[in-house]
Amino acid sequence: MDRLEKAIEKARAERATVNPSLMNPSLSGAAALARGAAPAFNGRSTPVFAPPSPSGDEPDEAQMERNRVVAHHTRSPEADIYRQLRTQVLHIMNKEGWRSLAITSPNYGDGKTTVALNLGISIALDLKQTVMLVDLDLRKPAMHRYLGLNPTVGLTDYLVKGVPLTDCLTRPPFERLNTLPAGSALDNSSELLASPRMIALAHELKTRYPDRLIIYDMPPVLNQDDPIAFLPQVDAVLVVVRDGVTRSDDLKRCLANLAAANVIGTVLNVCQ
């Protein structure tokens, strides 16, 4: 058993008693592990919302609970897990001066969208940060469904049809959080992500506001070439694996494909 497999087995054995950790795999030689998606909200905590935005885009709380989007809850052990992940991610990002983070996984079903949303909301609750969540899974967009939103336009409409970016943004009533849904699904997504218009947008999103972190919900590395096409535009990558589902060989192949990226760690998604 190599160091990567030993790290996964150790996290599985200790996840009930040990705080999650996130470390740079280039320092440890093995993937870092943290507890990921949490069970549905049990009703004991109080959601923290900002006043509704003028656009009226308001998440469906029941839909969010079904999809384990829990980071906005208070007095919640599940939300605390994402606060810990937030602290560790921000420590690395701020230390390196990085402003954009891609969240991906080896395969569909590993929990990347759940982690992206929870981490983005948790970071947005930090008074020092603002967040832009971008759904970059252009063939199978899901982020808006997890929030219970129904946007009419999104990123693909901006890139292909020239719809103004301001018309594509949604602002759920969480403080300091904006979302850019994917828009209409496309088949030629990798070509679009490597286009000059997308490259210019990625630069604009990252550099316009010094306190803003861009989080991209990326497609799985082993299912599409989109993540590889877009890697030059992101500062860091976080990989999500699902406990008991993701095979170690798939994780190794995923990390090998991301060898040119700054992979800051791996989140072990423990679905309950």
Image (tube, rainbow, N blue to C red):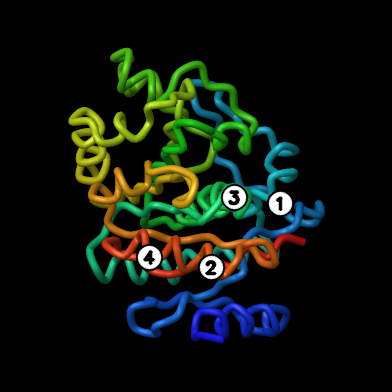
Q: Which residue is mark 3?
A: 114
Within 10 Å of disc 3 (Cα), the crowding (few <14, some 14-19, many 20+) is many
Q: From the top left corner, tell me how far across and down residue 65 is, in percent.
A: 73, 45
SS at mark 3 in the image: helix
Seen in the picture, residue 21 relative to 198 is either above or below; the reply is below
Q: Quadrant of the C terminus?
A: bottom right
Q: Residue at x 57, y 35 (%)?
A: 142
Crowd around label 2: few <14 · some 14–19 · many ≥20 (10 Å):
few
Q: Is residue 124 something one can see in this rendering?
A: no
Q: Secondary structure at mark 2?
A: helix
Q: Earlier in the sequence, mark 1 or mark 3?
A: 1
Residue position marked by numbered label 1 in the rendering:
46
Q: Are marks 3 and 4 in contact (CB under 8 Å)?
A: no
**Mark number for residue 249?**
2
Circle 4 Cα neighbour tier, 10 Å, few/some/many (<14 / 14–19 / ≥20): few
Q: Residue sitting at 76 percent across and 53 percent down?
A: 41
Q: Nearer the viewer, mark 2 or mark 1?
A: 2
Q: Nearer the viewer, mark 3 or mark 2?
A: 2
Q: Earlier in the sequence, mark 4 or mark 1?
A: 1
Q: Is residue 239 above or below residue 142?
A: below
- 211 vs 12, left or right, is left
Q: Residues under labels 1 and 3: Cα distance?
A: 20 Å
Disc 2 to disc 1: CB gap under 8 Å: no
Name which of mark 4 and mark 2 comes first in the sequence.
Answer: 2
Direction from residue 15 to residue 163 in the image, left or right: left
The one nearer the camera, 91 or 243, is 243
The part of the image, by quadrant, that contains residue 98 is: bottom left
**Dot 4: what SS?**
helix
Name the residue that disc number 4 marks.
256
Q: Position of residue 103 (x, y in %)?
A: 44, 53
Amino acid at pointer 3 = Thr
- Marks 2 and 1, the one that precedes in the sequence: 1
